[in-house]
Image (cartoon, helix red, strand yellow):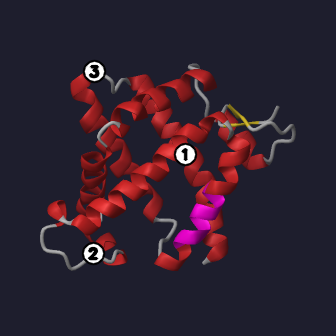
Amino acid sequence: ARKVAGFSTGETRLSSSERRLRGRLNKMGPDMMKTHVQESWAVIEKDIKPHGIKFFLRIFEIAPGALQLFSFKDVKDLASSPELATHACQVMNTVGKAVAGLSDLQKLIPVLKTLGAAHAKYSVKPEHFPIVGAALLWMLEEDLTPMGLWTPDVKEAWTKTWETVVSVMEPALTAAA
């Protein structure tokens, strides 16, 4: 079976980008990576709204201009904004679906491609991916560390998973722009 970032896709032929992704795998192995991501996400998912709001506020802290891409850009108190909360929950639920989809990349990859292409109409650019990734990893670290759940292996698993997501979404975004 073909594997992308160590996860089985059920196919046998590897593209050059998939070979590069496989090369990013570390000694922990794909099953342990998936386990780290899915188990840590299960904790976040239990109370998704505050995590999602924290994630978006971090995006806007890292890149204040990113706020202009959203319909709630003129809201004065973002942290209390129902519009931000709704969008944050939608995004976090999508992340949750992607995390669950790590068990079947053959089904997940087309979903990520569609998601990447869909963001072109919102003026999302490839340079936004590192900002979103940094905010996601920061939120995970902030919220999992107090419980002792943010370990070097969990960080590495999330980092490699994010790199995989970007490697699928970014070309789709670029092609649709």
Pointer 2: what residue?
72
Disc 3, disc 1: CB below 8 Å?
Answer: no
Q: Is residue 132 visible?
A: no
Mark 3 element type = loop
Q: Quadrant of the N terminus?
A: top right
Q: Is residue 26 visible?
A: yes
- Name the disc covering residue 13, or none: none
| Residue 173 within the segment the image draws in magenta | no
Q: What is the three-letter code of the residue carrying label 1?
A: Ala
Residue in view at x 61 percent, y 23 percent:
31
Q: What is the three-letter code of the residue carrying label 3?
A: Gly
Q: Is residue 131 left or right of residue 121?
A: left
Mark 2 element type = loop
Quadrant in the picture for residue 151: top left
The mark nearer the N terminus, 3 or 1, is 1
- Name the disc covering residue 98, or none: 1
Q: In the rendered view, tell whether residue 129 sits above or below residue 14.
A: below
Disc 3, disc 2: CB below 8 Å?
Answer: no
Pointer 3: what residue?
148
Residue range (magenta): 112-119
* Circle nearer the viewer, 3 or 2: 2
Disc 1, disc 2: CB below 8 Å?
Answer: no
Nearer to the camera, 150 or 81: 81
Mark 1 element type = helix
Nearer to the camera, 91 or 64: 91
Residue in view at x 24 percent, y 48 percent:
50
Q: Residues within 10 Å of mark 1 (few under 14, many from 20)?
A: many
| Residue 113 within the segment the image draws in magenta | yes
Give the percent coordinates (x, y) of residue 21: 66, 40
Q: Main secondary structure of the magenta part?
A: helix
